[in-house]
Amino acid sequence: MTLFEKIKKFYHLKILKRNYYRFGKCKQCGCCCENIYVRHGGNVIKTEEEFENIKNNDSYTFYKHIEIIDKDDFGLIFSCKKFDKNKRLCTDHKNRPSICRNYP
């Protein structure tokens, strides 16, 4: 880890008081596109009604790209609609949301 990366990690964990810090490079495996929990307002989305209310708000365009695939005790489990499971690639890479562009 370079000095810059160490400073960045310190800033996120200690100054911004984040619980986690992501680092590294995308392995293009698609793991971040399927079987994911989604947080909104600091909490994991737990009900279908909550998700529909958020999805219908035009300010949150990311939520139009995901669909509910399961539910467990922790919350709803999502998958990206634009992820091709056979090719393990995004079908609309040029128009992907900013959350995907900035990951990790």
Image (tube, rainbow, N blue to C red):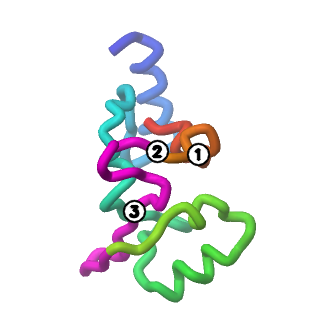
Residue 42 x %, y %: 49, 65
Magenta segment boundaries in residue numbering: 70-89
Q: Quadrant of residue 56?
A: bottom right
Which mark lies nearer to you, 2 or 3? Answer: 2
Q: Which residue does the image show at 25% across and 80% down from the upper left?
A: 73
**Which residue corresponds to mark 2?**
90
Q: Are marks 2 and 1 in contact (CB under 8 Å)?
A: yes
Q: Which mark is residue 28?
A: none
The answer to whether 42 appears left or right of 21 in the picture is right
Q: Is residue 75 magenta?
A: yes
Q: CA distance from mark 2 to mark 3?
A: 12 Å
Does 100 sit above or below residue 38?
above
Q: Which mark is residue 79?
A: 3
Q: Which residue does the image show at 40% across and 20% down from the upper left?
A: 6
Does 2 sit above or below residue 48?
above
Three-letter code for the amino acid on which mark 2 is drawn: Cys
**Which residue corresponds to mark 1?**
96
Residue 90 x %, y %: 46, 44
Of 12 and 30, nearer the camera is: 30
Q: CA distance from mark 2 to mark 1?
A: 8 Å
